[in-house]
Image (cartoon, helix red, strand yellow):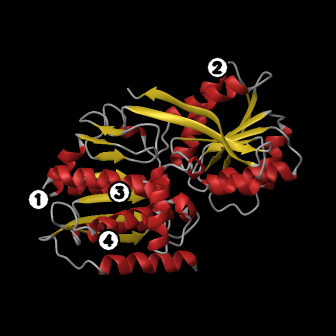
C-alpha cells in the first residue's frame, strides 16, 4: 500500500510540472518503486524528487524547471526496458536515471545506447563499466560498487579477526550480487582466509532457513553478504535463530541505520560509503528538515542516495547550460566535482575516463552494546579508483 501511494505521489509530482521539453530540463527515472527491491531502490527516487522539488521551488537551474518523469519497473527487466524506451522515445528525456536491480541493467543500457543518451545509476549498484576506462554513457552516484567494496570489507575482517578466518558468503541470485561474492571468495583465498560456503539466494525467497542452515553447518566465524538488504538481513536473522554466534558483515544499504538499532547485535557490522545520520552533521539536519516539510513517507535517513543524486544532477545541469540536449548533458557529466558535504567521505568527481569517482571512502558501523547506540567501528579509509 505504501509503495502504491509512493508511486502515485511521484506521478503527481511529475504532473505538477507540465513543462514541455522546450522550457524545462526533461529527466526520466525508472526504478523499483514496488517489488522485492523497493525498500532499497524506492527511497533514492523519493530523495531525488525531494531535491528536485527544492530546486524547482527556488527557480530551477539556469532559470529553467526540471521535469522529472518517474516510472515503476518493479525490479523486472522487461518493465525496465519498456520504461526506458518510453522515456527515451516518447518523453525525449535528456538523461535517464536508474534505481533498480542489476538484472534490469542490460536492457536499459541497450535502450540508452540506441538513443545515445547518458544513464545515471543512482541507488542501483555501480557496475564496473563506470570505472576507468569508463563506458561512454554510463555514470554512477551510488555508494556501493563491485570490486572495491569486497576489498575494503575483507581488509576490515582481516584487521578485526582474532583467529584464522573461516568465511561464508551470501548473495542474491542477480548478476552483480553473485559476481561480487564470487570475486570476494577469490580475494579471501588470496588473503589467507578459508572460504567454507557460499549461498546464492533467489530474490523471491520467503524462508531463508535452508540457506542459513548450510552456512551454519559449514562452521564459519565470519560471513559476508553483498546483496539487496532483504537478502543480507534475513540471512543474518535466520542464522541467529539457528544459534550461530559468529561475526556478520554486510553492505550498509539505506535501511542499515534503523536496522542496526532494531537488531541490537554487537557482532552485526555494516560497511558503506555513506555517513549515517547518527553522525548528526549539518547536512543530515537539513535533509531531516526538508523531509518533514514535504511529509516524506520514508525515514529521512533513507534519503541520502537520492540527495546525492540531486547534488550531482544540479551540478551537471548548471554545467550543461541552457538549452541543454542529451549531448551537452553527457559532456557536462565528464567534468563534474561535487562536494557531498559529509554524506560521503569525499567528493564525487567524474572525468572523461572515470564515471565513478577518483577516491572511494569506506566506514564501518555496528551497534555498540556498551553505548546502547549505533557507533563507528572503523573510520573512513580511502581507496584510489584506477
Which residue is labeled 4 in the image? 69
Q: Is residue 193 above or below residue 173?
A: above
SS state under label 4 = strand
**Neighbourhood count class around disc 3 (C-alpha, 10 Å): few under 14, some 14–19, many 20 upward:** many
Image x and y of residue 243, in percent: 89, 47
Query: Cβ–Cβ below 8 Å for labels 1 and 2?
Result: no
Of label 2 and label 3, which has the lower sequence position? 2
Query: In terms of image quadrants, where is residue 150?
Result: top right
- Number of numbered discs visible in the structure rendering: 4
Quadrant where the C terminus is found in the figure: top left
Q: Nearer the viewer, mark 1 or mark 2?
A: 1
**C-alpha gap between disc 4 and disc 2:** 46 Å
In the image, what residue occupies the spot 56% across and 65% down?
299
Residue at the spot of label 1: 322
Residue 381 vs residue 149, the one in the foreground: 381
Disc number at residue 191?
Answer: 2
Q: CA distance from mark 2 to mark 3?
A: 38 Å
Pick the residue in front: 285 or 178: 285
Q: Which numbered disc flags the more N-terminal residue, 4 or 2? A: 4
Q: Which residue is mark 3?
A: 310
Amino acid at each position: 500500500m505504501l509503495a502504491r501511494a509512493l508511486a502515485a505521489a511521484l506521478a503527481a509530482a511529475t504532473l505538477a510540472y507540465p513543462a514541455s521539453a522546450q522550457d524545462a530540463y526533461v529527466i526520466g527515472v525508472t526504478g523499483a518503486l514496488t517489488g522485492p527491491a523497493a525498500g532499497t531502490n524506492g527511497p533514492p527516487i523519493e530523495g531525488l524528487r525531494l531535491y528536485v522539488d527544492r530546486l524547482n521551488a527556488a527557480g530551477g537551474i539556469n532559470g529553467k524547471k526540471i521535469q522529472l518523469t518517474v516510472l515503476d519497473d518493479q525490479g523486472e527487466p522487461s518493465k525496465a526496458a519498456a520504461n526506458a524506451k518510453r522515456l527515451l522515445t516518447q518523453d525525449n528525456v535528456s538523461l535517464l536515471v536508474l534505481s533498480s536491480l542489476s538484472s534490469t541493467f542490460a536492457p536499459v543500457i541497450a535502450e540508452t545506447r540506441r538513443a545515445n543518451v547518458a544513464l545515471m545509476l543512482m541507488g542501483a549498484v555501480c557496475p564496473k563499466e563506470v570505472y576507468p576506462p569508463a563506458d561512454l554513457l554510463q555514470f554512477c552516484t551510488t555508494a556501493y560498487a563491485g570490486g572495491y567494496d569486497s576489498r575494503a570489507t575483507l581488509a576490515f575482517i582481516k584487521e578485526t579477526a582474532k583467529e584464522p578466518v573461516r568465511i561464508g558468503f551470501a548473495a542474491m541470485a542477480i548478476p552483480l550480487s553473485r559476481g561480487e561474492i564470487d570475486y570476494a571468495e577469490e580475494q579471501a583465498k588470496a588473503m589467507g582466509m578459508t572460504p567454507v560456503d557460499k549461498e546464492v539466494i533467489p530474490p523471491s525467497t520467503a524462508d531463508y532457513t535452508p540457506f542459513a542452515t548450510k552456512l551454519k553447518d559449514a562452521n564459519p566465524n565470519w560471513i559476508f553478504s553483498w546483496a539487496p538488504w532483504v537478502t543480507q538481513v534475513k540471512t543474518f536473522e535466520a542464522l541467529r535463530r539457528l544459534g550461530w554466534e559468529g561475526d556478520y558483515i554486510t553492505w550498509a544499504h539505506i535501511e542499515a541505520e534503523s536496522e542496526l538499532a532494531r537488531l541490537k547485535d554487537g557482532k552485526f557490522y555494516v560497511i558503506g560509503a555513506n555517513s549515517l545520520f547518527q553522525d548528526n552533521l549539518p547536512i543530515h539536519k537539513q535533509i531531516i528538515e526538508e523531509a518533514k516539510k514535504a511529509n516524506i513517507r520514508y525515514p529521512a535517513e533513507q534519503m541520502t542516495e537520492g540527495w546525492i543524486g540531486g547534488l550531482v544532477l544540479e551540478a551537471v545541469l548548471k554545467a550543461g547550460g541552457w538549452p541543454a540536449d542529451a549531448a551537452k548533458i553527457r559532456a557536462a557529466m565528464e567534468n563534474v566535482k561535487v562536494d557531498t558535504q559529509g554524506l560521503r567521505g569525499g567528493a564525487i568527481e567524474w572525468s572523461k575516463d572515470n564515471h565513478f569517482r577518483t577516491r572511494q571512502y569506506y566506514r564501518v558501523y555496528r551497534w555498540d552494546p556498551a553505548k546502547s547506540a549505533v557507533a563507528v567501528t572503523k573510520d573512513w579509509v580511502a581507496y584510489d579508483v584506477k
